[in-house]
């Protein structure tokens, strides 16, 4: 079986940041097609173990084929990382030495036309990581009010022209396919020039909404911190400014000695730091990586270490 081509983003930086070592126990919360997981497994054998999680059942199928040779060293679970602690209790997989999140949409999802993640091909508007769960992008586009759509596209897509786009969508409903939606957004923004396709931000907003990506992230980071042994590492790769902001703010709060409001004379919060920042500056792909893998251009990696 030929596997989909996929290049793991910031691979060397993530492996170094996690301090992957032989015999360690690690979790890949977004295993995808198994690129990061494979690199971790190569370094933790013969006695290490890896737990791979993904909400997309197709990703689990592909990664299972790819990682089959590692046998019992790898456990793969089709579930949301929002259920991280429950998954680890179920498989008695804690405490662990490192946890990786590689957020956003994968090449497998983008390149599978019928999943509806991309406007490069015509397909039904789905965009769900797990095709059996929740609202589709079509449900959102065709049932949300104009105000709800505008707010969603503005907040999740950071689209300045969200109201105009929402108005065009509502005036032309029902919208059935990816190309129909992309053309509507192009029509709404026909007089605007941009370096990216006009529909890019709208599609991203719908994908985030359909999968509750932002709502699941901070609870999952809290659970991940609880699961790490002292000295264990948390690494998060994000591609969207909102994801990166949530990650940055979470890590900074967890690493702070005090969370009292600015200007407070004496600390009263009693906060005890649980993390230490390893990368105070965000880690980005090199120009060589971006050249060889253009999808990595917006990636940002942040790393923190669990304290006693």
Image (cartoon, grey):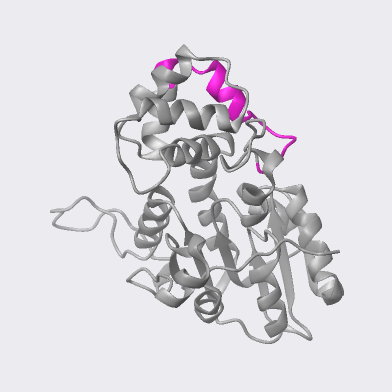
Res. 90 in view = no
Residue at coordinates 29% horizontally, 55% vertically from top-left? 259
- Indicate whether residue 302 is drawn in magenta: no
Residue at coordinates 54% horizontally, 23% vertically from top-left? 141
Q: Residue 160, how many percent across, how many down?
A: 30, 34
Q: Residue 102, how many percent across, how many down?
A: 56, 60
Instruction: Give the side of residue 291 with respect to residue 50, left or right.
Output: left
Q: Residue furthest top?
A: 171
Q: Quadrant of the N terminus?
A: bottom right
The one of 97 and 34 positioned closer to us in this rendering: 34
Q: Which residues are magenta?
A: 129-148
The one of 207 and 291 positioned closer to us in this rendering: 291
- Indicate whether residue 139 is drawn in magenta: yes
Residue at coordinates 67% horizontally, 80% vertically from top-left? 24
Quadrant of the image occupied by residue 136: top right
Instruction: Give the side of residue 72 with respect to residue 267, left or right.
Output: right
Q: Residue 61, how many percent across, how many down?
A: 81, 56
């Amino acid at each position: 079986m030929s596997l989909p081509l996929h290049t793991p983003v910031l691979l060397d930086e993530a492996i170094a940041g996690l301090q992957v070592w032989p015999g360690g126990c690690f979790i890949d919360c977004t295993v995808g097609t198994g690129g990061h997981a494979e690199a971790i497994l190569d370094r933790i054998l013969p006695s290490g173990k890896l737990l791979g999680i993904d909400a997309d059942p197709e990703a689990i199928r592909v990664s299972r084929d790819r990682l089959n040779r590692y046998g019992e060293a790898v456990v793969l679970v089709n579930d949301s990382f929002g259920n991280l602690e429950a998954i680890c209790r179920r498989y008695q997989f804690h405490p662990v030495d490192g946890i990786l999140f590689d957020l956003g949409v994968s090449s497998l999802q983008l390149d599978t036309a019928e999943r509806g993640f991309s406007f490069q091909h015509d397909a039904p508007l789905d965009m769900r990581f797990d095709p059996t769960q929740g609202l589709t992008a079509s449900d959102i586009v065709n049932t949300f009010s104009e105000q709800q759509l505008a707010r969603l596209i503005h907040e999740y897509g950071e689209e300045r022209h969200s109201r105009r786009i929402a108005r065009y969508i509502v005036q032309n409903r029902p919208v059935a396919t990816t190309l129909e939606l992309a053309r509507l957004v192009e029509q709404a923004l026909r007089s605007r020039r941009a370096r990216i396709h006009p529909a890019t931000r709208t599609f991203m907003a719908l994908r985030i909404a359909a999968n509750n990506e932002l709502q699941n992230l901070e609870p999952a980071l809290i659970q991940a911190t609880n699961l790490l042994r002292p000295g264990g590492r948390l690494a998060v790769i994000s591609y969207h400014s909102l994801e990166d902001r949530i990650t940055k703010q979470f890590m900074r709060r967890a690493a702070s000695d005090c969370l009292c409001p600015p200007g407070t004379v004496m600390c009263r919060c009693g906060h005890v730091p649980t993390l230490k920042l390893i990368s105070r500056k965000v880690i980005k792909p090199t120009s060589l990586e971006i050249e060889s893998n253009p999808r990595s251009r917006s990636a940002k990696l942040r790393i923190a270490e669990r304290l006693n």
